[in-house]
Amino acid sequence: MPVYIRLSLKLRIMFRKIVLPFLVISAVSMAFITDQNINKNTATGFAVVELFTSEGCSSCPPADALLASIENENQNKPLYLLAYHVDYWDRLGWKDAFSSAKFSARQYQYANWLNLKTVYTPQVVVNGSQEFVGSESAIMHESIATELAKPTSNLLEVSLNKTDKTGLSLNYKTNQKTDDYFIVVALIEAKAITKVLRGENKGRTLSHVQIVNQFESIALKGKMNGLVTIQPEKGKPLPAELIAFLQDNKTGKITAAARLNLP
């Protein structure tokens, strides 16, 4: 019996000196690994919000105002706002000075991607995969919050190569595959105010933000870095901001975005 007790005491001492430290180290290591995984899972996402609007549409001013509110609420977040003024309202009494047939064509392209029977204003598309009425505040806020909270590992970096009267050259770099992808580059005018003289909004003074003056879609053909050139349209000054994003040409899904301030 005494021998058994002495052995038990020795084993207890050995356990405290050797086994316990090992368990403590293991617990610390596991905690470190868990923290690392949590950090990876909490990576934030981004939201590209495209509004299709028109000064000739009486339902559009609330959507324009909502976009301005969203901009003010989300300063310094990876949120990219673009307002395209479509041209199919121009024949109904008031020609929108910011409108373009190219913007209308982009909206029709979304109708194809999202299997919609028609287009309408105001319409919002978020990250190329969800659409809804552009004045729906609750849906807008929920959609943006959902996209910002999604983890993403896709990156897009853009930098200015040169800019002059003949054009704008942009360097881009991404870590994702770009087969069947386009880089969409939009030149943005920050703000504008228009007094509407005719049409559905006759007599109203309308405020706009994040107006797309011009955009170009360039096929990347598998290239993960390179140089793209934008030729500014005649009569339009080079805006102060540029938004670029990667878009799947088959589905319309947007997978990465970036912003660049222009000199």
Image: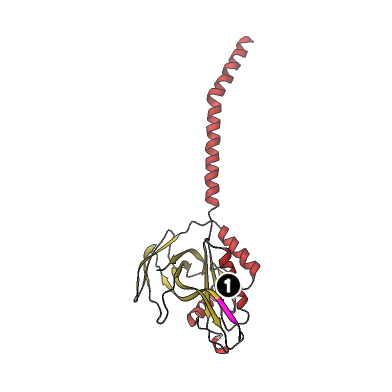
- Report the side of 226 relative to 200 (left or right): left
* Residue 11 x/y as whole percent: 57, 19
Q: Can residue 7 be seen in this view?
A: yes
The correct choice, above or below, for 85 with respect to 34 in the image is below
Type of the residue with mark 1: Val
- Report the side of 178 relative to 77 (left or right): left
Reply yes or no: does residue 49 show up in magenta.
no
* Residue 149 x/y as whole percent: 57, 58
Residue at image x 46%, y 65%? 259
Query: Coloured how?
Result: secondary structure
Residue at image x 58%, y 75%? 64
* Residue 159 x/y as whole percent: 39, 64
Mark 1 = which residue?
124
Q: Which residue lies furthest to the top in this view?
A: 2
Q: What is the magenta range?
A: 200-207
* The C terminus sits in image quarter: bottom left
Label 1 secondary element? strand
Residue at image x 54%, y 56%? 44
Mark 1, Cα crowd under 10 Å, few <14 / some 14-19 / many 20+, is: many
* Residue 248 x/y as whole percent: 48, 67
Reply yes or no: does residue 202 show up in magenta.
yes
Query: Which secondary structure is most common in the magenta stretch?
Result: loop
* The N terminus sits in image quarter: top right
Q: Is residue 131 visible?
A: no
Residue at image x 49%, y 75%? 212
Question: 179 or 203: nearer the eye?
Answer: 203
Total marks in image: 1
Question: 48 or 182: nearer the eye?
Answer: 48
